[in-house]
Amino acid sequence: MENFSSKLLQAAVEEFSRLPGIGRKTALRLVLHLLRQDSDTIERFSGSIVNLHQNVVYCSSCHNISDRELCDICSSPRRDRSLICVVEDIRDVIAIENTGQYHGLYHVLGGIISPMDGIGPSDLNIDSLISRIEKQEDTGEVILALSTTMEGDTTNFYLYRKISPFNIKVSVIARGIAIGDELEYADEVTLGRSIIHRTEYDKPSIR
């Protein structure tokens, strides 16, 4: 444990070190950097965090982070409404959007099925996905863009079983991303190609 000359400094470092991926040395470096900034910069920084926490909402349709009830993607008339790309979380939406290769809609599950972590279908935004498919008559394809892990494949299979009665195409992104890789860490070219060259879901034998 570091010996701080100021309890205020110590308290700030402890709060920063609670952030994922931030150790105490990095936390100290960030806090010291902020101390060197002028008051206006600090007020903008702290104000943006408070404003984010108080005012951000989740899109009522796709569950993406938004400033209003419907996010900019869902409300845009330029998006292809026949496509719904299902992703694990909001970081995947950002990663796919950065490729510039996809122009449909999204659906954020909020995780993947993982019995080891106590996460089942009822913990995810699956019912709202099925409801969207029922209500959006122009939906022609659901793209499953989940991580290529055992949990991701389990979730893909569960979603396929739920979607198959609607007689619409179910596809998965091409396996250009290494097994176990997260979408957010894939380079934009590889991820973009994986979306363009997506394939129809390879239906496992159903008993």
Image (tube, grey):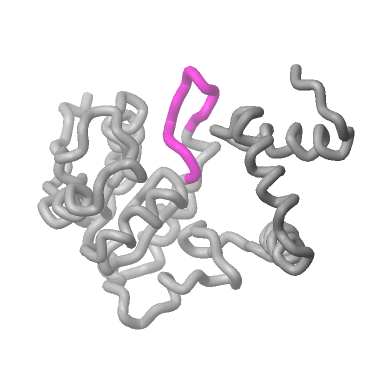
> In the picture shown, does residue 80 fall above or below 184?
below
Quarter of the image where the C terminus is located: top left
Q: Residue, x 54% and y 60% (percent of image)?
A: 65
Left or right? Give the position of 199 relative to 7: left
What x and y, as percent, mark residue 68?
A: 60, 72
Q: Nearer the viewer, residue 120 or 162?
A: 120
**Quadrant in the rendering for residue 2:** top right
**Quadrant in the rendering for residue 105:** bottom left
> In the picture shown, does residue 45 fall above or below 156?
below
Q: Give yes or no for residue 51 being in the magenta stretch.
A: no
Left or right? Give the position of 127 relative to 84: right
**Quadrant in the rendering for residue 60:** bottom right
What x and y, as percent, mark residue 140?
A: 22, 63
Quarter of the image where the N terminus is located: top right
Q: Residue, x 47% and y 21% (percent of image)?
A: 115
Q: Residue, x 66% and y 48% (percent of image)?
A: 33
- Does any portion of residue 54 appear in the rendered image? no
Left or right? Give the position of 184 relative to 170: right
Q: Nearer the viewer, residue 128 or 41?
A: 41
Q: Residue, x 36% and y 68% (percent of image)?
A: 136
> In the picture shown, does residue 176 fall above or below 170?
above
- Does any portion of residue 103 appear in the rendered image? yes
Which residues are the magenta region? Answer: 110-120
Task: Report the magenta stretch's main SS.
Answer: loop
